[in-house]
Amino acid sequence: MILFGSMTPKKPKAKKRPASKPSKAVNGATAKKPAKAAKVAKAAGAGTDPKRVAAILAKLDEAYPTATCELIHESPFQLLISTILSAQTTDVRVNEVTRTLYKKYPSPEALAYANPRELEQDIRPTGFFRNKTKSIMGASKGIIENFSGQVPRTMEEILTLPGVARKTGNVVLGTAYGIASGVVVDTHVMRLSRRLDLTKHEEPKKIEEDLMRVIPKDSWIKFSHQLIWHGRRVCIARKPRCVECNLESICYSKDKTV
């Protein structure tokens, strides 16, 4: 006969604890993101070490000691108009057009009150001639009415002129007046500053902010010209001539050709 009372009773199985769920954020807020320093490092690029930046500047000085603006002009006003015309075209084309343009329109008054249809034809080879005509006439009138016929010397004032954004303002203030108000960011500076890992951004405003942080202020004007020259002559868009580049040894761009 089996005596049930003599059997060793089984121990109850321990209940499995449910896997711990990630704690919910208070009031639906998401978890905190990495520290601000990490964000800045990611945005500015890993190549912004001061020693590397100094080496880049030294090599640009070596390659382009006399780099300057290639728009031909005889006054700050002419440079302003040439820079407006240079949008979406080459400096060579602008210089061809302005060779006769400034003889026909020698002053802000002449352009401010020009015949719009006639001016459109005068600048037609530069492209976007209708919009450029409005900008040129508007900027000329602004200079006459608000600045006594003189191109203003501050970024805040020059940006009030029609057709003038920061790139144009930096070109005029830097080249005509020697005022380092920022860094000129054109298509070449955008491309090269990313290739050299001086920025991760694609927007001109963000790129300029990054460059102003890592480039010494006394080099802003020269750096812009040198990078533009390098972009036109060596570090071209589709097939950079890396074998000819004196920056090749400190450049680690993914689209290098050597």
Image (tube, rainbow, N blue to C red):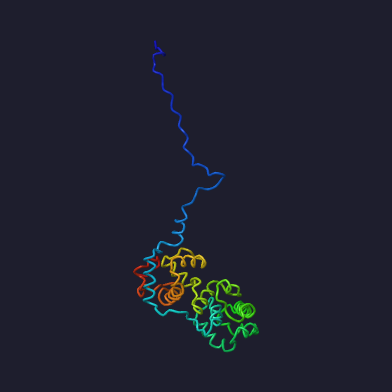
Q: Position of residue 175 (x, y in %)?
A: 49, 78
Q: Position of residue 31 (x, y in %)?
A: 50, 48
92 or 149, nearer to the observer: 149
Total numbered labels placed on residues in the image: 0
Please tell me whether residue 59 is drawn above or below residue 116 in the rendered image. above
Image quarter in which the N terminus is found:
top left
Image quarter in which the C terminus is found:
bottom left
Please tell me whether residue 149 is drawn above or below residue 250 in the rendered image. below
Position of 129 with respect to 190 (left or right) is right
State which quadrant residue 52 falls in.
Answer: bottom left
Q: Position of residue 34 (x, y in %)?
A: 46, 52
Furthest-top residue in view? 1
81 or 15, nearer to the observer: 81
Please tell me whether residue 213 is drawn above or below residue 27 in the rendered image. below
Point 46% across, 60% down: residue:
43
153 or 199, nearer to the observer: 153
Q: Position of residue 74 (x, y in %)?
A: 52, 85
Point 34% across, 69% down: residue:
249
